[in-house]
Image: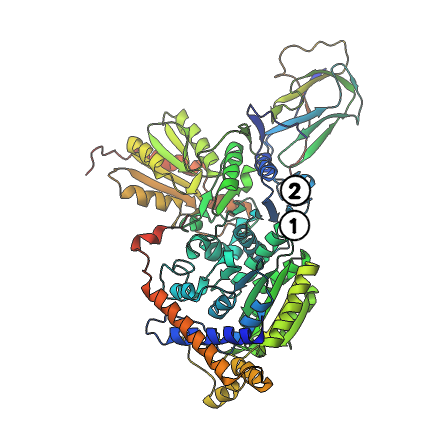
């Protein structure tokens, strides 16, 4: 395996290695940090995202669970309330649904309902996204979670952010839903040194542009960037914003961009109705801002493992480019009506 | 703790709940009428460093665990002197600093939470016992079986106490759980178990002590069933389904009357002493009510505090 | 003949690989079946073994380095007499083929 990275320079690594690195550093720094989940121990995680942790920290702190997401999350919530700092891994985001009761009815409400006597420093880490695994193993439901008061929702799109945001999640005092994506694991990227600190609540401008604003999170940032490249070749300069964090949502960064471009396309792999884009546009609509917009999301159908149907349902650069060209034909109204 | 103290604790619960229900603003309550011996007998077996989690039927256990009756009354009435500053109510009452990790109103919801508390205790609080009190109605929930499985697999110091009052609102336990005895549910997981008459506070205390000692010494889970009778409807908003005649017969099993009669019969306590205790209990309840009435409600802007 | 040892694209789920360790040095003889280099994808280790005899002449991507799919990892030649030029782009490729599970 690769040698230890120097603390002072960025190191290129795979997405899974960024996660393992953040987890390892958190576990070294704080004996209260534990990892629980299916296949997290000797197997090292379904994506090898916990590789090396079992050997380093042993079975008391890296615990394989049976397939029981309700109790897995409940146990992690209770352990956090009682003073541990657990990360519970839910391999497929689809099965987060099984554990929503302990997370939403206890985990995010414990501090409120006890008048501050309990806090729940818990990370629920889960992998979203479609990649040929069928209707019940492909979903992106983070939009359902961003409206839960008391729950932070992180969605990194790069190895650097996977590292920085997971590191920040281990230091949070309340529950964090950390959502990564099946299609991000093959990605390699430069990860900052151990002393780097992330401003997790701030969206990132991945690419600057004045003609229109593309807003995305997680894997869809790569779709947005690919679309922006193609648009750039025909003279359309798209600004690409990576939300990074869905709750709290950095609407200010999006507002600044849309105020300048006047054109917004939101891109998400989840559903359009009540999606991330719906929330962004609703918030912007209440501001003194004039803009044209389009939401791109999965088609309103289950995501099949059938390669033809899966590809048809998901957003891709072609759809973004087509929507962008259509938006570019709409004249801008620079004055507030 | 003497038997007289057990009686006093049960009388306190009964009088507290009666005083609460006499108020027009009593709110939605689940009472421990008939089930006081389970709460008192269990808490008599727990140590100060142990933790107790309960279902929504929390008033009796909270008082038995030693929470201040004024703070409990305040919590039930939504006042700032409440254990949770009035935010949780009966369904979520908590005082972790006093070994009452808290109630949770979701049926079965506290079981996996308790397993997590037990794991934290196993890792960082050697000898601590985490007890979770729940009803027969939770025994059909998936999370109940998931929790038994995890507790057995991971050897969690978890005491699961099923207060089997034989009714899940209107569903008799025989129609809710497909086993002959609830302790049968622990057997497949190899979890040690016992069953006790929940109307006999001395028997409950003895059985709970054996169970607590087992969990503390073995570091393994234990399942204790307390067979009780629900002498009131399920909640203050639920109608009674049993006949008056049936209720009269059940009242003959009242756990408070039982130990009171036994103490009188033993000659250890005379009427005067027992009346004095009743008077002390009444005074305590009056003081609790006065404290709650004197306390303010939270300010409306407090609604956004403690969310994050 | 001079060859560029290359992982051909496109490969689903792999844009680049990490070179873990070269198991032979410049001007070493390479025989069929010899372990030449270990690569790492996001999911697995890949052992690259020689399919034909030759000599390793230049390592383009050193230990710990990253190599894009389709870009040359190293230059090999049939004999030691041949002198590889500066460029690797137009050389015939020795292909490293694998699937990411």
Q: Residue A310 location in percent, x, y?
A: 51, 46
The answer to whether residue A106 is above or below residue A178 is below
Asked if the residue under mark 1 is in contact with the one under mark 2, i.e. CB atoms within 8 Å, the reply is no
Label 1 marks which chain's residue? Answer: A
Q: Nearer the viewer, residue B143 or A197?
A: A197
Residue at image x 43%, y 60%? B83
Whole-number angstrom distance, CA of label 2 to CA of label 1? 10 Å
Dot 1: element? strand
The answer to whether residue B282 is above or below residue A246 is below
Category of crowding for the residue at label 2, using alpha-carbon neighbours closer than 10 angstroms: few (below 14), some (14–19), many (at least 20): many
Q: Is residue B210 left or right of residue B288?
A: right
Please give the residue where the numbered disc 1 appears in the rendered image.
A64
> How many dots with numbers?
2
Q: Residue B90 location in percent, x, y?
A: 43, 66
Q: Which mark is residue A166?
A: none
Q: Which mark is residue A44?
A: 2
The answer to whether residue A250 is above or below residue C83 is below
- Earlier-in-chain disc, 2 versus 1: 2
Residue at the far bottom in the pictured view: B245
Q: Nearer the viewer, residue A145 or B53?
A: B53
Dot 2: element? loop
Quarter occupied by residue B228: bottom right
Coloring basis for residues: rainbow
The answer to whether residue A134 is above or below residue A254 is below
Quarter occupied by residue B91: bottom left
Residue B196 can be seen, yes or no: yes
């Amino acid at each position: 395996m690769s040698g230890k990275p120097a603390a002072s320079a960025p190191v290129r690594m795979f997405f899974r290695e960024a996660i393992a690195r953040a987890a390892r550093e958190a576990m070294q720094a704080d004996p209260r940090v534990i990892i629980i989940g299916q296949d997290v121990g000797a197997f090292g995680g379904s994506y090898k995202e916990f590789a090396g942790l079992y050997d380093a920290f042993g079975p008391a702190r890296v615990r394989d669970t049976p397939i029981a997401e309700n109790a897995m999350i409940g146990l992690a919530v209770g352990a956090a309330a009682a003073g541990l700092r657990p990360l519970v891994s839910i391999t497929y985001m689809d099965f987060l649904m099984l554990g929503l009761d302990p997370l939403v009815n206890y985990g995010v409400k414990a501090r409120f309902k006890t008048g501050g006597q309990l806090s729940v420093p818990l990370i629920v880490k889960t992998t979203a996204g479609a990649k040929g695994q069928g209707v019940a193993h492909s979903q992106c439901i983070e939009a359902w979670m961003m409206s839960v008061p008391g729950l932070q929702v992180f969605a990194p799109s790069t190895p650097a952010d996977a590292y920085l945001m997971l590191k920040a999640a281990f230091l949070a005092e309340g529950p964090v839903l950390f959502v990564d994506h099946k299609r991000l694991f093959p990605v390699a990227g430069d990860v900052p040194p151990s002393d780097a600190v992330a401003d997790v609540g701030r969206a990132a401008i991945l690419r600057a542009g004045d003609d229109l604003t593309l807003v995305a999170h997680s894997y869809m940032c790569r779709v947005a960037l690919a679309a922006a490249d193609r648009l750039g070749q025909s003279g359309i300069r798209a600004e690409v914003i990576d939300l990074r964090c869905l709750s709290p949502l950095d609407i200010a960064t999006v507002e600044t961009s849309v105020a300048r471009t006047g054109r917004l396309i939101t891109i998400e792999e989840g559903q359009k109705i009540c999606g991330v884009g719906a929330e962004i546009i609703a918030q912007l609509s209440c501001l003194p801002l004039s803009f044209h917009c389009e939401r791109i999301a999965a088609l309103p159908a289950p995501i099949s493992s059938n390669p033809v149907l899966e590809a048809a349902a998901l957003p891709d650069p072609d759809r973004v480019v087509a929507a962008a060209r259509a938006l570019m034909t709409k004249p801008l109204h620079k004055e507030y009506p | 703790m003497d038997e007289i103290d057990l009686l006093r604790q049960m009388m306190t619960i009964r009088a507290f709940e009666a005083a609460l229900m006499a108020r027009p603003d009593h709110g939605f309550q689940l009472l421990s009428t008939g089930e006081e011996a389970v709460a008192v007998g269990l808490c008599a077996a727990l140590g100060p460093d142990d933790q107790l989690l309960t279902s929504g039927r929390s008033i009796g256990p909270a008082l038995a665990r030693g929470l201040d009756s004024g703070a409990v009354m305040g919590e039930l009435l939504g006042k700032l002197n409440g254990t949770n500053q009035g935010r949780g109510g009966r369904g979520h009452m908590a005082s972790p600093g006093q070994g009452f990790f808290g109630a949770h109103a979701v049926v079965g919801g506290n079981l996996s939470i308790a397993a997590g508390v037990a794991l934290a205790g196993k890792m960082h609080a050697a000898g601590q016992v985490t007890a979770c009190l729940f009803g027969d109605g939770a025994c059909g929930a998936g999370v109940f079986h998931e929790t038994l499985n995890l507790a057995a697999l991971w050897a969690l110091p978890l005491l699961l106490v099923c207060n089997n009052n034989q009714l899940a609102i209107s569903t008799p336990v025989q129609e809710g759980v497909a086993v002959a005895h609830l302790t049968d549910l622990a057997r497949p997981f190899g979890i040690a178990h016992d069953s006790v008459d929940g109307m006999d506070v001395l028997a409950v205390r003895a059985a709970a002590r054996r169970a607590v000692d087992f969990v503390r010494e073995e570091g393994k889970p234990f399942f204790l069933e307390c067979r009780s009778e629900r002498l009131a409807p399920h909640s203050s908003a639920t109608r009674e389904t049993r006949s008056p005649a049936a209720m009269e017969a059940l009242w003959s099993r009242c756990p408070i009357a039982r130990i009171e009669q036994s103490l009188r019969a033993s000659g250890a306590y005379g009427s005067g002493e027992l009346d004095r205790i009743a008077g002390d209990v009444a005074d305590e309840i009056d003081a609790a009510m006065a404290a709650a009435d004197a306390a303010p409600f939270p300010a409306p802007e407090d609604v956004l505090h403690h969310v994050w | 003949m001079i060859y560029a040892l290359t992982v051909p694209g496109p490969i689903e789920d792999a844009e680049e690989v990490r070179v873990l360790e070269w198991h032979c040095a410049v001007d070493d003889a390479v025989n069929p079946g010899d372990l030449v280099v270990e690569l790492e994808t996001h999911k697995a280790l890949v052992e690259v073994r020689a399919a034909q005899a030759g000599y390793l002449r230049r390592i383009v991507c050193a230990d710990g380095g990253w190599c894009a799919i389709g870009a040359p990892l190293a230059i090999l030649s049939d004999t030691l007499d041949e002198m590889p030029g500066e460029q690797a782009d137009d050389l015939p490729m020795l292909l490293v083929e694998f699937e990411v599970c």
